[in-house]
Amino acid sequence: MVKINGKEVEWHDTPKGWYLTDVKQHILWQNEETGARFVLMKFPKGGNHEHPHTHPHANQWAMGLLGEMEQPNGTHIKFTGDAFSFQFTPKGEKHGGLPDGGKFCSDCYGLFYFDGPLTKEFE
């Protein structure tokens, strides 16, 4: 069993070159054989954090847990305990860092699950 208190998370650097800003991660669980993993992510307040990319070997499930974000069309989204967001991105589908991408209006926290090896291919 994995239990974690959000105030006691030990944040770690993400792989070099994957993000444009100081994004942090905490791996909650990882299957060494398949590469599948649950990862808690912290995105600092500011603009776009990553280049457009795909995950060629893993589907991605993402849940926005806490923070505020502005979508490219100007819509604000607030993540709270009862107002979270959920997104599924199939392996190989381009996402992240699109030219008209939104911005983080506060530090944002998300929970991600990848069902295979976590690799990125950049465009």
Image: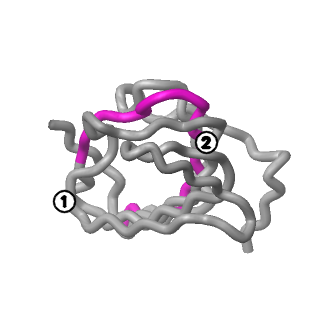
Where residue 120 sits: x, y (%)?
27, 45
Q: Secondary structure at mark 1?
A: loop
Work out how far the residue at label 2 is from the one at label 1, CA to CA, in angstroms: 24 Å
Residues under numbered marks 2 and 1 in contact, where contact means CB atoms less than 8 Å apart = no
Q: Nearer the viewer, residue 110 or 84?
A: 84
* Residue 35 appears left or right of 13: left
Q: Would you say residue 73 sits in the magenta stretch?
A: no
Relative side of 28 to 122, left or right: right
Disc 1 marks which amino acid?
Gly
Type of secondary structure dominating the magenta stretch: loop
Q: Residue at x 54, y 63 (%)?
A: 63
* Residue found 71% across the figure and 60% down from its top: 80
Provide the residue designation for mark 1. 92
Q: Is residue 33 visible?
A: no
On the image, the x and y values in percent for residue 92 come to 18, 59
Task: State the SS at label 2.
Answer: strand
| Within-10-Å neighbours for mark 1: few <14, some 14–19, many 20+ | some
Question: What are the residue bounds of the magenta stretch?
Answer: 33-53
Residue 107 falls in image quadrant: top right
Residue 33 in the image: state x and y as whole percent.
Answer: 39, 67
Residue that badge 2 annotates = 42
Question: Which amino acid type is shown beneath numbered disc 2?
Answer: Lys
Q: Is residue 23 left or right of residue 82?
A: left
Residue 27 shows in this picture: yes
**What number of labels is visible?**
2
Q: Nearer the viewer, residue 63 or 25?
A: 63
> Which mark sits nearer the N-terminus, 2 or 1?
2
Up-down relation of residue 104 to residue 84 (above or below): above
